[in-house]
């Protein structure tokens, strides 16, 4: 192992549990907390494929 690798640390990814379309999923917390990041990952087609309940939930969390 070289010197640059010895000082590298890996932090665990923080996950948030969400109920989307009646299914519990875990998403990286950064997606939940940062709307711009969420929008970069979730496409309009993916959003439209969700149940109305899941779409409404995403609207609520994006306002926070």
Image: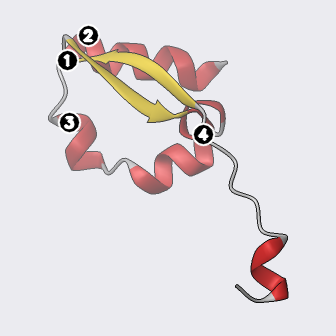
User: 9 above or below 47?
Assistant: below
| Disc number lying in front (1 or 2) | 1
Which residue is under mark 3?
48
| Of residues 44 and 37, the one drawn nearer to the viewer in this rendering | 37
Which of the two discs, 4 and 3, labels the residue nearer the N terminus? 4
**What's the distance in space between the residues labelled 1 and 2, CA to CA?**
7 Å
Outermost residue, front direction? 1
Q: Secondary structure at mark 3?
A: helix
Which of the two discs, 3 and 2, labels the residue nearer the N terminus? 3
Residue drawn at (44%, 18%), measured in percent from left and top? 17
| Of residues 59 and 9, the one drawn nearer to the viewer in this rendering | 9
Are the residues tagged 4 and 2 within 8 Å (C-beta)?
no
**What's the distance in space between the residues labelled 3 and 2, CA to CA?**
11 Å
Which of the two discs, 4 and 2, labels the residue nearer the N terminus? 4
Which residue is under mark 1?
21
Could you tell me residue 28's position as x and y percent? Answer: 52, 38
Are the residues tagged 1 and 2 within 8 Å (C-beta)?
yes
**What's the distance in space between the residues labelled 4 and 2, CA to CA?**
19 Å
Of the numbered discs in the image, which one, if any, rests on residue 36? none
Residue drawn at (70%, 48%), measured in percent from left and top? 11
Which residue is under mark 2?
53
Point out the image quarter for the N terminus: bottom right
Could you tell me residue 53's position as x and y percent? Answer: 26, 10
Residue drawn at (55%, 39%), measured in percent from left and top? 31
Which of the two discs, 3 and 1, labels the residue nearer the N terminus? 1
Of the numbered discs in the image, which one, if any, rests on residue 35? 4
């Amino acid at each position: 192992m070289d010197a640059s690798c010895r000082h590298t640390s890996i932090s665990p990814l923080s996950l948030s549990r969400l109920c989307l379309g009646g299914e519990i999923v875990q998403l990286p917390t950064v997606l939940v907390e940062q709307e711009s990041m969420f929008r970069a990952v979730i496409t309009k087609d993916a959003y439209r494929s969700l149940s109305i309940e899941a779409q409404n939930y995403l609207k609520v969390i994006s306002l926070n």
